[in-house]
Amino acid sequence: MNDTTMLATRPKTGHAGDYDAVIVGAGISGMFMLYRLRELGLTAKVFETGTGVGGTWYWNRYPGARFDSESWTYGYSFSKELMQEWDWKEHFSPQPDTLEYLNYVADKFDLRRDIQFRSTVKSAHWDDAADLWTVTLDDGQQTKSRFLMTAIGILSAHTLPAIPGRDSFKGPAYHPARWPHTPVDFTGKRVGVIGTGATAIQAIPEIAKQAAHLTVFQRRPNWAAPLHNAKISKAEMDAIKSRYDEIYAHCAQTPSWFIHEADRRKAVDVSPEEREAFWEKLYAEPGFGIWMGNFRDILVDEKANALISDFIARKIRQRVKDPVIAEKLIPKDHGFGARRVPLESGYFETYNRDNVELVDVINDETIECITPNGVKTSAKEREFDILIYATGFDGVTGAFDRMDIRGKNGVRLREAWEQDGPRTYLGMLTEGFPNMLMVLGPHTARGNIPQAIEHTVQFQTGLLRHMLDHGLTHVETRPDKVDEWTQTVIKAAEPLLSSKVDSWQTGVNRNVEGRQVRRVLGYNGNGVHFRRTTDEVAKGGYREFVFR
Ligand code: NAP
């Protein structure tokens, strides 16, 4: 019997379950969690709906899908060998390359043998007497485990538009997060896209190049800025590899764990010339610098925000030939950066093409229904061969809501969070749900997602090591710590202009019942503070938790 089979038959946390831990999801979080649990000598089973690893990058195969984060800050950093082996081909990696990377990781660390694909977790119920979770899949298969690790992402519960007749369309209709595995051929086709979020902003320029005609139905426009992607040469990649320690150490010291951090100056304090020069520079640079590396007041001060919004609006007017269309593409209901800024590659120029039409479905027409042949608005019916619902996600809590998770005394997680929004400690544990660890749970730090994941998984597996070392099998949060963290999170969101705007980040999705009211769903404080807090908890012996 080899080490692996020994572990598989001998759980370490002294229970009568099948595994020490069940991990829900085989994306970036689930894969790393599995790797770490194995290191601890624990047995784990991953359940994954898809047929392969990769999570977000497995599902979102739409044309134009790629990182908005620098590729060389997005990979796992736990294995120096892996970092040296992998060559990123572009500064902002396209989805196929990223999926290839995640498959490479799965192969290198032999992860697939503990992942059960085509397996959707329907429910997870806590049994307090047995100290076990019972996890049930949609085909009825049941598994018992000591721990439940949710590795379900923040944008995995996709939502279709609540438009009458949606399912009556005769042609193919796709949501980008359920894109077919074989490329969709748009050649000679009339295509309709509903939605203009980050996903649509990536897909629209690519579809427009192929389709005979493309109609974009825009409800609210989003501010967007150029991505400036480029290939990475061999020499450049070698140079990046030689600087990995420095790059990741730098990211760990920035508020959102990107290479970018806010300029110390305030937009309102500098001269108009200095402001313009700085913004021209940022607009010409790759990545999120224009959002995260901008003057430090643009995301909190209305006046500073109005100045940067005016700058970006002028850019849109310069890039879009028809001034009427340009005005439709400029947001009027929120300022630049108050919603997650999509980075684009020729998005605005796409509206200069003869085969592209923009329909403003707030000010000019309203969508009445989907018909068998297309979309009927208050003005007319347009016929399409293909429809794309780029209508986003029930962010952060949506994927939790889709499972029937019940904690102590049969309390449902969905109901526990319904009234006042989620309540967690560090976004990782929630009251009344023992032994449930959330990787990207509500109220956790996010920013550069893989770095947030690595940090969280390290913290959580550190907690498990502590439990193993002390013969502990049951962990809960201390209620006072949940109160404290929930208040910290709410306070951190208060000064931000983004808190005053409807978006998936504030939990608003008009296509989902009960999701019309804003909630605080992420920790918007400084990532450095978050790291420090978690490090102190670990160093202090996890006194913020109650063990049994
Ligand atoms: P989204 O930003 O929520 O955009 C959804 C779009 O659909 C919005 O324009 C929305 O309009 C529209 N919409 C929804 N229901 C509609 C309806 N019934 N009728 C008409 N329009 C409707 O979703 P997303 O574009 O999928 O992006 C979500 C997040 O995913 C991003 O913010 C980002 O964090 C992430 N993402 C990342 C990348 C990347 O890293 N490169 C790429 C894509 C996405 P309203 O604004 O009026 O609601």
Image: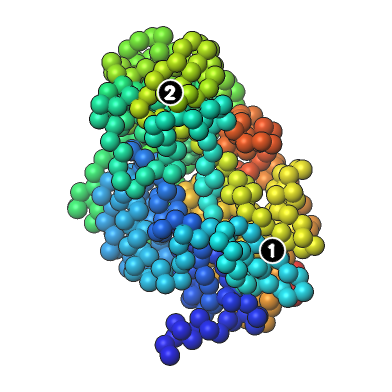
Q: Looking at the figure, which quarter contains the C terminus?
A: bottom right
Determine whether, in the image, residue 340 is placed left or right of residue 318.
right
Disc 2 from disc 1: Cα separation = 43 Å
Q: Please identify the quarter of the rendering in which residue 404 is found.
A: bottom right
Task: Say which of 263 and 446 sits in front.
Answer: 446
Q: Looking at the figure, which quarter contains the N terminus?
A: bottom left
For the residue labelled by badge 1, is the local secondary structure a helix, a strand or a loop? strand
Quick check: is the Cβ at mark 2 less than 8 Å away from ligand 1?
A: no
Residue 217 in the image, given as x and y percentages of width and height: 45, 22
Instruction: Please name the amino acid that badge 2 sits on.
Output: Gly
Q: Residue at x 54, y 38 (%)?
A: 159
Residue 81 in view in this figure: yes
Whether residue 493 is situated above or below residue 358 in the rendered picture? below
Which residue is labeled 1 in the image? Answer: 125
Task: Say which of 425 and 348 sits in front.
Answer: 348
Mark number, residue 374 = 2
Determine whether, in the image, residue 369 is placed left or right of residue 210.
right
Residue 444 in the image, given as x and y percentages of width and height: 60, 51
Mark number, residue 219 = none
Q: Residue at x 65, y 68 (%)?
A: 134
Determine whether, in the image, residue 426 is placed left or right of residue 112.
right
Residue 288 in the image, given as x and y percentages of width and height: 42, 38
Q: Residue at x 46, y 71 (%)?
A: 114
Whether residue 314 is situated above or below residue 111 in the rendered picture? above
Looking at the image, the residue that sits furthest to the bottom is 1
Residue 93 in the image, given as x and y percentages of width and height: 32, 46
2 and 1 marks in contact (CB < 8 Å)? no
Task: Say which of 107 and 476 sits in front.
Answer: 107
Q: Please identify the quarter of the rendering in which residue 543 is found.
A: bottom right
Quick check: is the Cβ at mark 1 less than 8 Å away from ligand 1?
A: no
For the residue labelled by badge 2, is the local secondary structure a helix, a strand or a loop? strand
Q: Residue at x 38, y 70 (%)?
A: 109
